[in-house]
Every structure is written in C-alpha cells, then in structure tokens.
Image: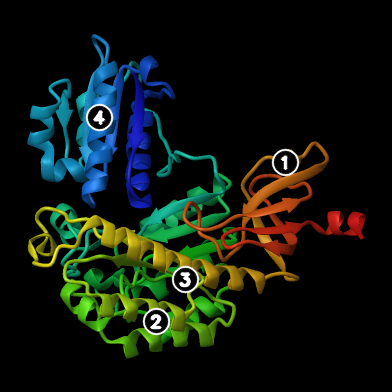
Amino acid sequence: MRYHLVTLGCPKNAVDSEHLVRLLSQARHEAAADAAAADVLVVNTCGFIDASIKESTDAVKELARGKRHGQKLIVAGCMTQLYGPKLEAEVPQVDAVFGVNQWERIAEMLGPAEGETIDIPDTSRLSSRPSAYLKISDGCDRPCTFCIIPTIKGRMTSAPADDLVARARTFAAEGVRELVLVAQDSTDYGHDLGASDGLADLLLRLAEEVPELPWLRVMYAYPGAVTRRLARVMASLPQVCNYIDVPLQHGSPEVLRRMKRPSNPTTVRAMIELLRSEMPDLAVRTTFIVGSPGETEAEFEELLAFAEEMQFDRVGVFTYSPQAGTPAAAMPGQLPEKVKRRRYRELMELQQGISYRKNQDQIGRVLSVLVESEPGQEDGQWPIFVGRTYRDAPEVDGMVICRGSAEPGELAPVTITGAGPYDLFGASPQEIAVVG
C-alpha cells in the first residue's frame, strides 16, 4: 500500500510519526507525498489546545472531502484520545481511530505487503534536514492547570538510555548533525527509572558514545529543576549547545500559583543565573501565556517587568486558550479575546526590542552555522545559504542568511555582519576576503 501521512502539533508528535513510518516501511508500504496517490490516509493529530483541535479536525475533514472509493482514512494521536467518538460521528468517512501510542495497531491493521518484512533502523525521518528530534520521555507528572497532556499521555515514562543511545547512533550514521532532546519535561528524565539526575547522565553518555554528533540541544527544561551538576555537565561538553528552553509561562507569582507552576521568582532567577554563570554565552528561550483566567492588568505588568529584567534571548508568546477537561477552563475570570490579543502585542513588542539588542551583540563574532539550505543566489549576484547558530533551535527560532557557498549539513564558520530582531546576516571567510 501507499500511505499519505499528515503530522500536526509539536516535535514530539513528529517523533511518533517517524516511528509509524518505520513500522510501515518494515512492512514494505510506501509513502506518498500526494494524498490522491495514496491507498491509506493517516492523520497524527494534536489536542493540546482548542486551536490545535480545530486544526486537526479541519485536516481530517479536508482529507475526507477528497477521499476516493477504496481509500482508507485513519486518525490517531492526541486529539483522538479525547474526542475519538465525537470525530467519528462528525466525519463518517473516517475508517478507524487510534489513540496515542497505538502505532503498532495501525501497522497491524494495514498488514504487511507482499514479501518478507525488512529491517529498518529505529529512525525513519520525515525530514531531510540536518537536525532530528530524540524523544527521551513521554507523558508528564506536573499538575499545570491549563494543560491536558497528563490526561492524554498519562504519567511520565522515560525511554531506556540504551535505546536512546542506539537511536542517536543511527541518526549520526544517517548524516544528522544536531540532535534535539525533547520531552514534556526533559529535566524529569530518568526519575521513574531511579536516577536522581538522569538528563545529565544521558548527555554524558550521548557525548561519549556518539561523539560524531557535533550538536546536542536541550529543550523543555522545567523551571527550577536544572541542578548544578546538569549545568556543569552542559558547560563541560563541547557537543552540548549553550542553549536551553525553559517554558516559564508567566512572571507573576499569583498567576503562576493559579497555573500550579513554580511560583517563586527567586528560584527561577537563581536557576537562570546558575546556567549563565556556567555558560556565559548561553542563549535562553522561554514561553509565556498571556490572558489566562483571572490575569489582572497588574499581574500582566509584572510579566512585562519580569521579561525586561531577565532579558531572554528568545521568547514565544501564546494567548490563553481554554481546553475542556482542564481546571483552568472552569476557572472564573475568563478574559475577552481582545484583551488577550492586546497583551500579546505588548509583550511581543517588548521582546522584539530585547531580541534585536541581543542579536546586535553577535555582530563581529565568528559563529558555526549549521547549513540547512542548498546554495542559492541573492539578486542574481551573490551566492547565499541559510542556516542556524547554536542560539537557534529548529523551527522555532531565527536563521542566519549568509553570503558564501556551503552544503546542507555542513558546520560553516560565518562572520556575523548584521542583525534584525529575529534573524542574523553574515558572510563566510571567503566572501569577507572578496568584499574586503
């Protein structure tokens, strides 16, 4: 059979889709880029917030409208864990619904193609980019009132370190240059296996046993959960990017208490100070939610002051979206959308100025850039390529637009010559010499 797979949501969903691709490839099924050419249509959905549910539902309905006689439409993943029966009733063209972690059942339903199954490595990437995601755990034990993930995924379960190292080796053999470690809470990794500082242990193993991977990147650390040992391990390993993503969600203690997030500003400040002291050129990314239930103007001003004080390198801002089944959705004080949008704009404008100044500080530095694009032309004259520095995670942060020639997957030295609020501009040494 030929299958067409649509993946929605976060990088962790992309990892799940890659696992399904491996299973289907082992059974000799083939991927189809065009839905019309496929025998089976599969949607890996996201159910994190209402907007995600709508996006997933719309994607299923679009495929259902174009579904031809004989095609199968399968829906799986986070959204179906919550709304599978409702979706089946609303879209009768759906042939089967599977929840999370039921990828083997999808493969069993389709069965093997003719001939024996074949051995496929434990990575089957959906992208040819030089970076890949390594999901180190699934589920979450945190009690955040706005989040439905524990209901969908259950308790946190760590992947065995031996399996993760084996996957990392396969990624490296396939030409991956950057491995991005993802989880709902990466700093909780290994606690269920009896480890007291499991993420630090895992980074040490990856760096020692897969030294051919030049970049390891840590995403989604929990506020206050970075230990001194973890900070020192990150600083001591050349492969670990001096970058961390810590989703703080707010800067007001009262809002954080309502969210059931770590609410002591002193703890958060101490963690960031620890990381910056160990890695002076550290890039810190965070996310904030504006407009959560009961957020007052004074509390929003606390968030603005906190963002100004902390000077984060990268910030993602989201307006609160109620998710049925979460405590926050039933809280009083739900705010109008226009208030949420206004607060979003104010915080983004503040952060844009901070990001611009941070990027200006990079001018004159020579940074390694992981090349993502094929060489091209700028205005028909200058050869250019596009990539990322250690300061930028794939898909969520900025890019570097460089004059010069370099191949995808190469770590190219680039002199930073200019900066905007999000992206940098630079030139390879050869171009600097020509221009000079």
Residue of label 1 = 375
Mark 1 vs mark 3: in front: 3
Mark 4 vs mark 3: in front: 3
Counting residues from the start of the chain, the first of labels 2 and 3 encountered is 2
- Give the CA separation, mark 4 to mark 2: 42 Å
Task: Report which quarter residue 430 is drawn in.
Answer: bottom right
**Three-letter amino acid code at disc 2?**
Ala
Between residue 135 and residue 417, name the one nearer to us: 417
- Give the CA separation, mark 1 to mark 2: 42 Å
Q: Quadrant of the C terminus?
A: bottom right
* Mark 2 closeness class: few <14, some 14–19, many ≥20 residues within 10 Å: some
**Three-letter amino acid code at disc 4?**
Val
- Give the CA separation, mark 4 to mark 1: 36 Å
**Three-letter amino acid code at disc 3?**
Leu
Residue of label 2 = 305
- The reply to whether dot 4 and dot 2 touch (C-beta < 8 Å) is no
Secondary element type, mark 3: helix
Residue at horizontal 33 percent and vertical 78 percent from the top: 301
Secondary element type, mark 4: helix
Q: Position of residue 375 (x, y in %)?
A: 72, 41
Counting residues from the start of the chain, the first of labels 4 and 2 encountered is 4
Q: Which mark is residue 60?
A: 4
* In this view, 433 is above or below 262: above
* Mark 3 closeness class: few <14, some 14–19, many ≥20 residues within 10 Å: some
Residue of label 3 = 350
